Amino acid sequence: MNAARELQPVQTEEQQPRKSRFAFLEGWLYLLPSIILFSVFVFYPMFRTIYLSFFLADQIGPFEFAGLENYHYILRSDSFQSSIKATVLFVLFTVPATIILALFLALLTSEKIMGIGIFRTFFSSTMGMSVAASSVIWMFMYNPSIGVFSKIAEWLGLPVIQWLQNPDYALLAVSLSTIWMSTGFAYLILLGGLQNIDPHLYENARVAGVSYFYQLRRITLPMLSPTLFFIITVSFINAFQTFGQIDILTKGGPVESTNVIVYSIYKDAFINNDVGSASAQAVILFFCVLVLTVLQFKLGEKKVHYR
């Protein structure tokens, strides 16, 4: 043993810094592809958007420095205020309903029962459909002449509702379609979280004779809290970025009742050719989502039970 130790080379003080520098460079080389991709597709567009928000600009580029004029204009604009209201209502309509529905379906199908895989596939199938295809399906369902909702209303003797043409119902109609589209992803994540809970906890609870709802409150929800925290955060971010179904179903109407901020950005940039105003709205949306996410991590993570 002593001879083997003597044969081992002893690193000098000069070799140790070289080794640490090589490891440092090696780590950056591994990160380089990701850094390049993020720089091209995330960081550059973000800083470019912030830059354009201080200019009067069109799709060609900036042509006059405006300072904070774009921000003053949109904050005083009735259209932007209505888009903020529509966005907040849309998020409040879709996120809680999606999480509750997905959790309910995940709890129903978490048991190991023969044939339960068919229902799991059925409940998660919306995840495999594109937003465009799903929106077209819902557009036909909302059609006042041939839509399924109109047929049900006629069968019940109720008046037919113009779901997508009435400003009182348009946002609710888009929210219902979004809940249906989003439930599949949330359901799949929550089902995975439920199946990852140690079954011995439930066995001990059944031996103790506690009720199902007590198990749900004291075992399931605490152990599922990391998954719930993740899916709530992702759902909030996705809700603020909703665009596809708005564009296909209502195009921001009627009377701007579904003109959420992302669609307002699209209209200003590509229809009204006011890139400066669109960039300012994008910056405001970015910081709103950032603040909301930070608050979720500060307040919500305290209630997360990590094993």
Image (cartoon, helix red, strand yellow):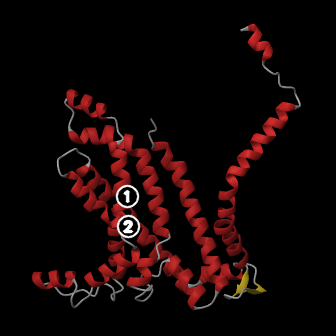
Q: Quadrant of residue 258?
A: bottom left
Q: Quadrant of residue 269?
A: bottom right
Q: Which residue is mark 2?
A: 94
Q: Is residue 178 above or below residue 145?
A: above
Q: Is residue 275 above or below residue 295?
A: below
Q: Amino acid type of disc 2?
A: Thr
Q: Is residue 52 above or below residue 235?
A: below
* Helix, strand or loop status at disc 2: helix
Residue drawn at x 60%, y 68% as measured from the top left? 286
Q: Is residue 66 above or below residue 200?
A: below
Q: Which residue is mark 1?
A: 186
Q: Nearer the viewer, residue 185 or 295?
A: 185
Q: Amino acid type of disc 1?
A: Ala
Is mark 1 in CB contact (under 8 Å) with mark 2? no
Looking at the image, can residue 247 be seen? yes
Q: Nearer the viewer, residue 291 or 9?
A: 9
Residue drawn at x 38%, y 53% as measured from the top left? 189
Measuring from the top left, give residue 265's x and y in whole percent.
56, 80
Residue drawn at x 55%, y 82% as measured from the top left? 266
Image quadrant holding the N terminus, namely top right
Measuring from the top left, give residue 126's x and y in whole percent.
33, 66
Mark 1 vs mark 2, CA separation in Å: 12 Å
How crowded pointer 2 is (Cα within 10 Å; few <14, some 14-19, many 20+) is rated as many
Query: Which numbered circle lies on residue 36?
Result: none
Measuring from the top left, give residue 281's x and y in whole percent.
60, 77
Image quadrant holding the C terminus, namely top left
- N-terminal of the pair, mark 1 or mark 2, is 2
Single out the residue that lies furthest toward the top: 2
Q: Quadrant of residue 279?
A: bottom right
Residue drawn at x 36%, y 51% as measured from the top left? 190
Measuring from the top left, give residue 104's x and y in whole percent.
27, 54
